[in-house]
Image (spheres, helix red, strand yellow):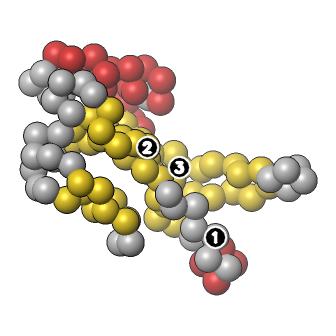
Amino acid sequence: MAENPLINDIYQQFIDYFGEDKVDLQKYTSRTFKFASDCSYEVHTGDNVILVHWPTVTVTNEYDESVEIWDLYAATVISPSGVLVRGPIFNRSTYDNIQWQSDYAHKV
C-alpha cells in the first residue's frame, strides 16, 4: 500500500471492485510512463499507477459475434493528491496465432 491515505482509499476501491489478486499499485519514479511500446504519456515522479489484470475477456461486436482475449491489463495514473492524471490505458500480452496475424490488438 502507498504511504498516502488518499491513494490507499482509491487503491482499496480498485481492490474491492476487481479483487485483490487482480490489482497492483506502483509509485512511478521516472518522467515518461511507457505501458505499450508505441504509446507513452507524460506523468510526474511520485504519481501512482494502479494496474488491473483480467485473465480472460469476451469481446462482443454489434453483430453479437464474440471472441475471447487473454491477459488484458489496464493502467490508471493518479497524482499524489488523488487526481486522475491518465487512465485507463489498456494493453494485452497474450495472443493466439489468428489474433496475432490479424493485428487484433485491443490497445488504447
Quadrant in which the N terminus appears: top left
SS at mark 2 in the image:
strand
Q: Position of residue 13 (x, y in %)?
A: 38, 20
Q: Which residue is mark 1?
A: 104
Q: Position of residue 63 (x, y in %)?
A: 90, 53
Q: Residue placed farthest to the right in the image?
A: 63
Which numbered disc flags the more N-terminal residue, 1 or 3? 3
Reply above or below: 94 against 75.
below
Question: Which amino acid, mark 2?
Answer: Pro
Q: Which residue is mark 2?
A: 88
Reply above or below: 85 against 62.
above
Question: Which amino acid, mark 1?
Answer: Tyr
Question: Which amino acid, mark 3?
Answer: Pro
The answer to whether 66 appears left or right of 80 in the picture is right
Q: Which residue is mark 3?
A: 55
Reply above or below: 92 against 84.
below
Which numbered disc flags the more N-terminal residue, 3 or 2? 3
> From the viewer's perspective, is the residue at label 1 or at label 3 nearer?
1
Point 14% across, 46% down: residue: 44
SS at mark 1 in the image:
loop
Q: Closer to the camera, 1 or 35? A: 35
Point 24% across, 24% down: residue: 82
Q: Position of residue 4 (x, y in %)?
A: 12, 21
SS at mark 3 in the image:
strand
Point 16% across, 29% down: residue: 80
Dot 1 and dot 2 residues touching (CB under 8 Å): no
